[in-house]
């Protein structure tokens, strides 16, 4: 039955809250007082307090059951970069709503005040991974303190063996062109084409396309001047990844290579990536270099 279903987990854990511990101590105190004095009023109060404890356990169990939670991890994850973990929370109970639900992941939490029956809500928690490579998805729990806050009852959302590939850390890679050429090398052809960048202005020759006459310069010099445009295909770079054997410096080099690669692609360059044991052509890399990022993430 959905009323008793606890998602992927098969049992719920229970722990008293600070308020619950105080209430339990008061309940025991009233019970001892009722036994010692034989006062019927104290017996009545003791019974009511016990009923509150029992009702709290039963209602919290019903409130937590019948809740289905699906974890939706982002496709591209970078180390030390906040990423949104999305959770789809669905109440499978046909008639009974759920109240005061909290999803917690490594101390970060999001709160759902009210979840109607047969309804779904999507919530997000930002988290990050500390290192590149294969990482275990952090443990997530669904808990509630409903109805009186005496007990915290929770179930696990995900399994401990689920993993996700984390790409290297990425930083701002803004640098001068000369500095980039010095550090990583360059391949840029001298081809003339019909791109968007101006290559040079020269004297107009017979057979040149009149469409590209530079009229402002022509007016200044009194001679027909022609615009040479850079071929967009020449906007190509080669990144040579030659990692050091120094483990302390290796992470910096991996981060730098990934950062520069993404920076160049963002500016519309075709990039070829040469690693010690393989080469990634610009056609393999495309507009988002998942093959290279995967290689760098798993590089040892």
Image (cartoon, grey):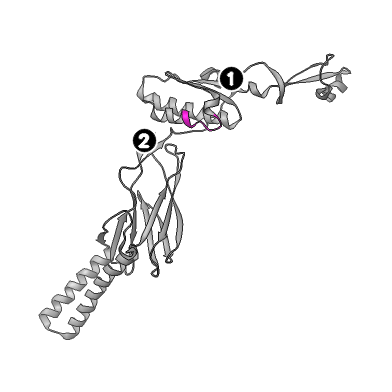
Q: What element does badge 1 sit on?
A: helix
Tell me which segment is drawn in magenta.
Answer: 286-291
Instruction: List x then y, in percent, for residue 275.
Output: 45, 20
The mark lying in front, picked from 2 and 1, is 2
Please tell me how crowded label 1 is: few (under 14), some (14-19), or many (20+) other residues with Cα within 10 Å: few
Q: Quadrant of the N terminus?
A: bottom left
Instruction: List x then y, in percent, for residue 39.
Output: 15, 85
* Count of marks, rendered view: 2
Q: Are marks 2 and 1 in contact (CB under 8 Å)?
A: no
User: Distance between the Cα atoms at labels 2 and 1?
Assistant: 36 Å
Who comes first in sequence, dot 2 or dot 1?
A: 2
In the rendered view, would you say 203 is above or below 12? above
Task: Give the residue at the far bottom of this rendering.
Answer: 40
Q: Which residue is mark 1?
A: 178
Which residue is rendered at x = 39% and y = 26% of the image? 299
Task: In this rendered view, identify the residue nearer to me: 5 or 264.
Answer: 5
Q: What element does badge 2 sit on?
A: strand
Is 287 magenta? The answer is: yes
Which residue is rendered at x = 35% and y = 62% of the image? 66
Which residue is rendered at x = 83% and y = 19% of the image? 225
Instruction: List x then y, in percent, for residue 86.
Output: 44, 50
Is 156 magenta? The answer is: no
Q: Which residue is mark 2?
A: 134
Tell me if I can see residue 268 in this picture: yes
In the rendered view, would you say 210 is above or below 287? above
């Amino acid at each position: 039955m959905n009323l008793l279903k606890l998602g992927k987990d098969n049992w719920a854990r229970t722990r008293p809250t600070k308020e619950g511990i105080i209430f339990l101590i008061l309940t025991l105190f009233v019970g001892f007082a009722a036994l010692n004095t034989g006062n019927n009023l104290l017996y009545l109060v003791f019974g009511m307090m016990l009923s509150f404890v029992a009702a709290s356990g039963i209602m919290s169990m019903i409130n937590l059951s019948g809740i289905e939670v699906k974890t939706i991890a982002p496709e591209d994850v970078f180390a030390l970069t906040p990423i949104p973990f999305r959770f789809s929370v669905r109440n499978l109970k046909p008639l009974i709503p759920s109240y005061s639900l909290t999803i917690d992941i490594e101390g970060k939490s999001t709160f759902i005040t009210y979840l109607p029956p047969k309804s779904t809500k999507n919530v997000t928690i930002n988290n990050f991974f500390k290192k590149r490579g294969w990482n275990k998805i952090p443990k997530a729990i669904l808990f509630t303190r409903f109805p009186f806050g005496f007990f915290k009852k929770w179930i696990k959302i995900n399994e401990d063996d689920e993993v996700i590939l984390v790409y290297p850390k990425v930083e701002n890679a803004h640098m001068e062109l000369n500095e980039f050429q010095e550090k990583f090398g360059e391949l840029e052809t001298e081809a003339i084409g019909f791109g968007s960048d101006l290559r040079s202005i020269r004297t107009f020759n017979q057979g040149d396309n009149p469409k590209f006459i530079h009229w402002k310069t022509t007016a200044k010099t009194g001679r027909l001047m022609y615009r040479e445009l850079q071929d967009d295909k020449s906007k190509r770079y080669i990144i040579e990844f030659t990692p050091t054997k120094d483990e302390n410096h290796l992470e910096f080099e991996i981060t730098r290579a990934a950062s520069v690669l993404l920076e160049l692609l963002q500016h519309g360059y075709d990039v070829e990536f040469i690693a010690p044991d393989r080469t990634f052509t610009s056609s393999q890399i495309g507009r988002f270099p998942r093959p290279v990022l995967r290689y760098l993430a798993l590089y040892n």
